[in-house]
Amino acid sequence: MNSSQWYKDKVFYQIWPRSFKDGNGDGMGDLLGVYEKLDYIKSLGCDGIWFSPLYPSPGVDCGYDISDYFDIADEFGGMEAFKRVLDGAHERGMKVIMDLVVNHTSDQHEWFQKSRQRIEPYTDYYIWRPAKADGKLPNNWDSLFEGKAWAWDEVRQEYYLHLFAVQQADLNMDNPLVREEVKKVLRFWLDMGVDGFREDVITFISKKEGLPDDYIMPAAKGFGYFNHGPHLHEYLKEFKDDVFSHYDCMTLAEAPMISPKKALKYIDETADPVLDMMIQFSTQEADCLFTDFVHTPFSLRKLKRAFSSWQKGLEGKGWNMLYMENHDHPRIVSRYGSEKFHSESAKMLAASYLFLKGTPFIYQGQEIGMSNWYPKDPSMYEDVQTRWQYENVGVKKSPEKRLQRLWHGSRDSARTPVQWDGSENAGFTTGTPWFYVNENYKEINVASQEKDESSVLNFYRKAIGLRKELSCVRYGNYEEYGKNSSKLYIYSREDEKQKILVICSFSDKNERLKVPKAFDLEKAELILCNYDSADSPDLRPYEARVYLWGKQAKI
Ligand code: GLC
Ligand code: CA
């Protein structure tokens, strides 16, 4: 939180460390591997890295269950390896942000171990409740991962709240001591030189007083009582005033179920914001209902509404975080694009969001169009949420239907190792990979795309390069055209020097292009296209074009 707002000019690359690159041959991605690839990340035009958790963890939720906030896990190379990566990134002009997971800790964390034994001052570090008189759970809230949100602890003889896995116990943020612990964590990493945080489900940290039963939500009971709770703003402000405001750093908050209007309560730059950016979920909901497991046909109109409402809703007040993929959703080319038109659609999806206003994030493998993973056997899934879904939802359906549900819904599709080349294990490791490599690695990999001028990878490079050269992409206004089209997404960005028109077809057929009246293509320069030429009057399947009027002025 600072006035320089450096994050507005960055393009971030998200690393999910287990599957990025193994540097020591033990089959697990690590920081040695990251160090080897810093120049690669830089070559994309990315100048920021978000690390999913690197801390020591039992790994129930792949690192989102932290057992020590002040260290880096040995399997990733420990603190020394991290400092080398941090310096290496800084030397290359790249910023580094960490994942801050403080809604909950692992049940193996020392705080929890002491809390369950009522050792002071840890007794009230978590949300403990006795069983009700009739032996029932303290309330009817659901966990977002598995069953009810309460687990019984034999040691303490009480229930504790866990909004995620049983082994992820929710911290009691209402306890000032817990907030002081969080501040210590923040200062520790910021003092080391880390440039900010992506704050995991931070909108859940304040629960409604009295933890009432929820009679409103049919599923995900409790959601309205722990999302955007009564003290959320107050606690975020405290973190800002006591810590963030003393550093040149950025904060990015994960915020499920949020509207632009609500987001402005936290990120309005004209009012004393308590956060810099928020991760909204609406652009992830164009082919599902709230969760990827409830699949619906892809709706471009839904996606466009999401993009435009955020572009317009934050205009002049707040800054957008832009993304298509992360470690929590299946791969975008398989969802909003087409595996048949793989290269065309992967590039079009890049163009559809890289020219919007905000700070783009690219998730590892997205830049080569990595696609979904279709295991034959449900037991091959690793993710705790996927496993619970398989065992508990739709169990009466046929085995094929049950498996397909996982193909559509599981975030494990985004967690297979990055496909670096066509050699064994996709060049991810010389050992035995911790997780399955997608079988398509011989066709989709970095090495082959490096050699191909017209690859998805090189398209990303071009698009990011243009983004950095065009002032209208950084500052310009956003306007959408043809809102009703269910096939085309067309938008412009314009400042006083220049304007661009971005045209994206989400159709697997040819589509008639109706150029909005204000745009004379004769006078424009075509600066990006995912086909060899753009002289066809119709748009070809998944075609994307970007036209420029005015000077290509450097920012
Ligand atoms: C966030 C993370 C996700 C994790 C969950 C619990 O949504 O992105 O990966 O499982 O929080 O920490
Ligand atoms: Ca390793």
Image (cartoon, rainbow, N blue to C red):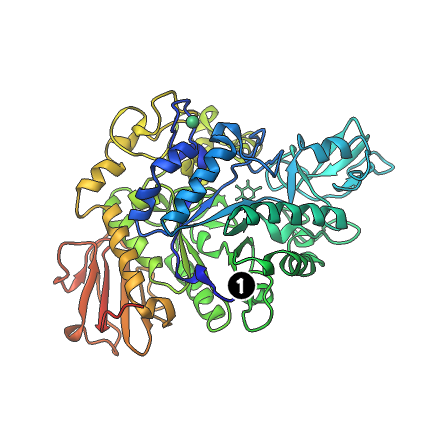
Q: Which sits in the foreground, 471 or 70?
A: 70
Location of the C terminus by quadrant is: bottom left
Q: Residue most toward the top? A: 432
Q: Which residue is disc 1 drawn over? A: 2
**Which quarter holds ligand 1?**
top right
Residue drawn at 60 percent across, 45 percent down: 188
> Where does residue 285 sit, x and y in percent of width and height?
46, 52
- The residue at 65%/33% (across/down) is 166
- Assign a secondary structure to mark 1: loop
Q: Nearer the viewer, residue 202 or 404?
A: 202
What count of labels does the image hold? 1
Residue 177, above or below 356: above
Q: Is residue 367 above or below residue 536?
A: above
Within 8 Å of ligand 1, the CB of disc 1? no
Q: Position of residue 41 (x, y in %)?
A: 34, 45
Q: Where 509 falls versus 517 (above or below)?
A: above
Q: Nearer the viewer, residue 449 or 88?
A: 88
Q: Quadrant of residue 375?
A: top left
Name the amino acid, label 1: Asn
Q: Is residue 86 left or right of residue 389?
A: left
Label 1: how many residues lie within 10 Å, few (<14), some (14-19) or many (20+)? few
Q: Locate residue 68, reporting x and y percent.
A: 62, 35
In the rendered image of this protein, does residue 545 appear above or below residue 439?
Answer: below
**Which residue is painted at 13% across and 54% down in the image?**
532
- Quadrant of the frame with the N terminus: bottom right
Name the image quarter holding residue 31: top left
On the question of residue 405 being in view, the answer is: no
Q: Residue furthest right?
A: 133
Observer able to see residue 544 = yes
Residue 91 drawn at (x, y percent): 38, 48
Give the residue at x 24% y 29%: 422
Q: Quadrant of residue 105?
A: top right
